[in-house]
Image (cartoon, rainbow, N blue to C red):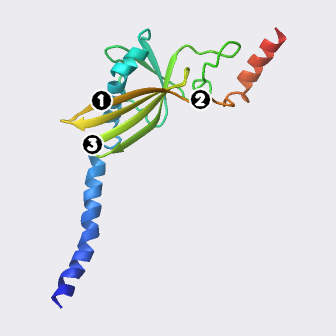
Amino acid sequence: MLYRFFLKPFLLLFPIVLFACHSIEDKSIKNNHLDIAQIVTKIVNGKLFLDENKQTDTLFFLKNGFYNNSWPHHTPKFKLVFIENNSRSRMFNIGPGFPHDARQRLSIVKFSHRNDTCTVAILENGSNLFYDAKLLYKNKEWRLIEEQVRVGGRAEKFEFENEKWYKNWKQKINKQ
């Protein structure tokens, strides 16, 4: 009898407590615009990123779902410029005989956040390099704790091949 008396309120109260704890955790720092800006700044100031981009002074970020107006326009090393996200700005620099864009064009392709840890993958669109980073939120600041640079796979077909600008460019090359 006493068992039923305590069990019913517990069963009703337990899901409410679980839901409340989960929503408090989600509100803390998840996808906060300022956190995303701080995370990106930490990554581009990381040792491996700086080693790979010694000759670069401007980074061009594609405006995707992670972009917002609170992003910085410069870091101590780089000027940050935000460009439209389209097939031309995502184009790989394939090699001789193909269109070429020498700008350092970056896209955030993965952003996962759990509790006080964040993992991010940034793609350099021209060279198909991926910058992977793991960050930890400690003392109200994001800290870069792990970084890696890797080469992406080879594409069989490029998304711009059926677009008008590419077909026109290809016709000009073929005529020459």
Left or right side of 41 for 173: right
Left or right side of 6 for 128: right
Q: Distance between the residues labelled 1 and 3?
A: 12 Å
Characterize the local packing of mark 1: few (<14), some (14-19) or many (20 or more) Cα atoms within 10 angstroms.
some
Characterize the local packing of mark 3: few (<14), some (14-19) or many (20 or more) Cα atoms within 10 angstroms.
some
Tag 1 and tag 3, C-beta contact below 8 Å: no
- Residue 110: give its label: none
Q: Looking at numbered disc 1 in the image, what kind of residue is underneath it?
A: Leu
Instruction: Name the residue carrying label 2.
Output: 86
Residue sitting at 84 percent across and 11 percent down?
Answer: 175
Whichever of labels 2 and 1 marks the residue nearer the N terminus, that label is 2
Whichever of labels 2 and 3 marks the residue nearer the N terminus, that label is 2
Q: How far apart are marks 2 and 1 (CA)?
A: 30 Å
Instruction: Name the residue carrying label 3.
Output: 116
> Where does the N terminus fall, quadrant-wise?
bottom left
Asked where in the image residue 42 lies, by quadrant, the reply is top left
- Secondary structure of the residue carrying tag 1 is strand
Instruction: Name the residue carrying label 1.
Output: 144
Q: How far apart are marks 2 and 3 (CA)?
A: 33 Å
15 versus 109 height, above or below: below
- Secondary structure of the residue carrying tag 2 is loop
Q: Looking at numbered disc 3 in the image, what kind of residue is underneath it?
A: Asp
Q: How many labels does the image show?
A: 3
Determine the residue located farthest toward the right in the rendered image.
Answer: 175
